[in-house]
Amino acid sequence: MRGVWHTERVKSAEEELMAVVPPGSLMRKAAFGVATHALRLLRGRRRVTLLVGAGNNGGDALWAGYFLRRRGVAVSAVLLDPAKAHAEGLAAFRRAGGRIVSEVGAPDLVIDGIVGLSARGPLRPAAAALVEGVKVPILAVDLPSGIDPDTGEISGPHVKAHTTVTFGCLKPVHALADCGDVHLVDIGLRPVDPDFVLLDREDIAWPVPGPSDDKYTQGVTGVAAGSATYPGAAVLSTGAAVLATSGMVRYAGPAADAIRARWPETICTGSITDAGRVQAWVVGPGMGTGSSSAEVLRFVLDAGVPVIADADAITLLASTPQLWDARDPDAALVLTPHDREFERLAGPVGADRVAAARKAARRFNAVVLLKGHRTVVAAPDGRALVNSATSSWPATAGSGDVLSGIIGALLAGGVDPFLAAGYAAYAHVLAAELGADGAPSPASGLMNAIPDAIRTILSVPSGRIESGDPLEGTPA
């Protein structure tokens, strides 16, 4: 797992490192990394414009311009606040033949060094006007200017980066906002205890059967979902559980006939009380919010096994607080709200999605999976992870029902609830990409691609955010 650290902790680690290395060496090493990735993006083209703000981020850009000039690149710099430009970086840039200009011009690449980790809020008007006119790829230094570094919030004009080069460690913005391709340059920073993590494919330990396993030892997933009005939710949740496990799935509810027709391997009953023993329950998708659904939820919460509560189950928990009294305090609970469901349950999400999910996880003593393009998973013990979608294909009706079934299968298989939610979120995104294959696909297509997603997870390691090292050589 790759760690992510909030900016105050990053700055503290940088200060500790700067106290024991030669002055300016960290900035030059970081800038050399920026220049290296700029050369890769240029691919032989030769014109770069720097957008230079005050302070160290502007210094990084100016030193990058210095190294690019030494490689024969024509580099110009627009100083947004000339009086506050980084003095040493500006002097080096001028010595190398860099030009100071007032307009972006017609470059092949723009380097964004406007603001750094200390900045908050959108771009100011002058910077916004410059950025708005850029028609070529932008390489952002540390983060795209105008995006909040700790929350990824976008509240106005900001840089839309093709590539971001950051230093030492990942910051929340890289996981919570669109930063383009993110490259991490090692500058010797070694922070510990990340604030949250990102899952990579090689981190996922998907349960697979062994020589002594049978359908029971691998976990029996129970699904209480669907209604006469919405049988499809039950078909999708149950199907996802079937495809995500080699164990057994039991379905209980009014969509039993539809489940038997689509998934003959499922054990179906019409009543929750006749379902038989399970190792985890999926409850909520499409089941409605009436009194009979409340009784189903009450039964499941009291069953003494892990529960994943989604959709209508979340609405019932929000509107009928006494249902919480039925919960077995020793059984794990996973809640999977989207933003509107989260607001009913715990109040507005706000700008800081990780903090909101963590707060709700502590309040309800449950794992909270806050759905979105950047899905946040938080545990009651403070653990948190973010899974970023690489496309918007999962944004389709029924997609959440599929996710619930995957989580339920992993819970039944004995996976830690926090990791079960994280693994499922990763597999869900991957299945959506494989099922869509570049064209819109319904949730059933996503569901059908679950085996391919699991096969990919088990066989092909790959990181979500790329980590790149500078080219051979050291900065002068």
Image (cartoon, rainbow, N blue to C red):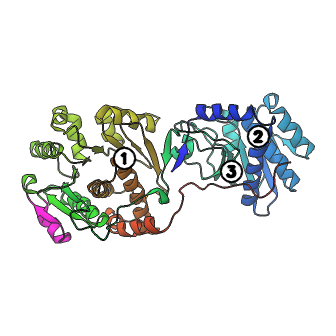
Identify the residue position indicated by label 1 in the image.
Answer: 418
Disc 2/disc 3 C-alpha distance (Å): 20 Å
Q: Is residue 460 magenta?
A: no
Q: Amino acid at mark 1?
A: Phe
Report the magenta residues as a range: 255-270
Tell me if I can see residue 103 in this picture.
Answer: no
* 70 displayed left or right of 282: right
Q: Amino acid at mark 2?
A: Met
Q: Pick whichever of labels 2 and 3 is earlier in the sequence.
A: 2
Q: Nearer the viewer, mark 2 or mark 3?
A: 2
Name the residue located 63 percent from the left edge and 43 percent from the top edge.
Answer: 143
Identify the residue position indicated by label 3 in the image.
Answer: 138
Q: Pick whichever of labels 1 and 3 is earlier in the sequence.
A: 3
Q: Amino acid at mark 3?
A: Ile
Identify the residue position indicated by label 2 in the image.
Answer: 27
Disc 1/disc 3 C-alpha distance (Å): 37 Å
- In x, y percent, where is residue 44? 79, 63
Q: Considering only vertical position in the picture, is 319 above or below 69?
A: above
- In x, y percent, where is residue 345? 29, 35
Q: Say which element carries label 3.
A: strand
Name the residue located 88 percent from the left edge and 52 percent from the top edge.
Answer: 70
Bin the neighbour count of mark 3 within 10 Å (Cα to Cα): few under 14, some 14-19, many 20 and up.
Answer: many
Q: Residue furthest top?
A: 83
Q: Pick whichever of labels 2 and 1 is earlier in the sequence.
A: 2
- In x, y percent, where is residue 340? 33, 40
Q: Is residue 262 magenta?
A: yes
Bin the neighbour count of mark 1 within 10 Å (Cα to Cα): few under 14, some 14-19, many 20 and up.
Answer: many
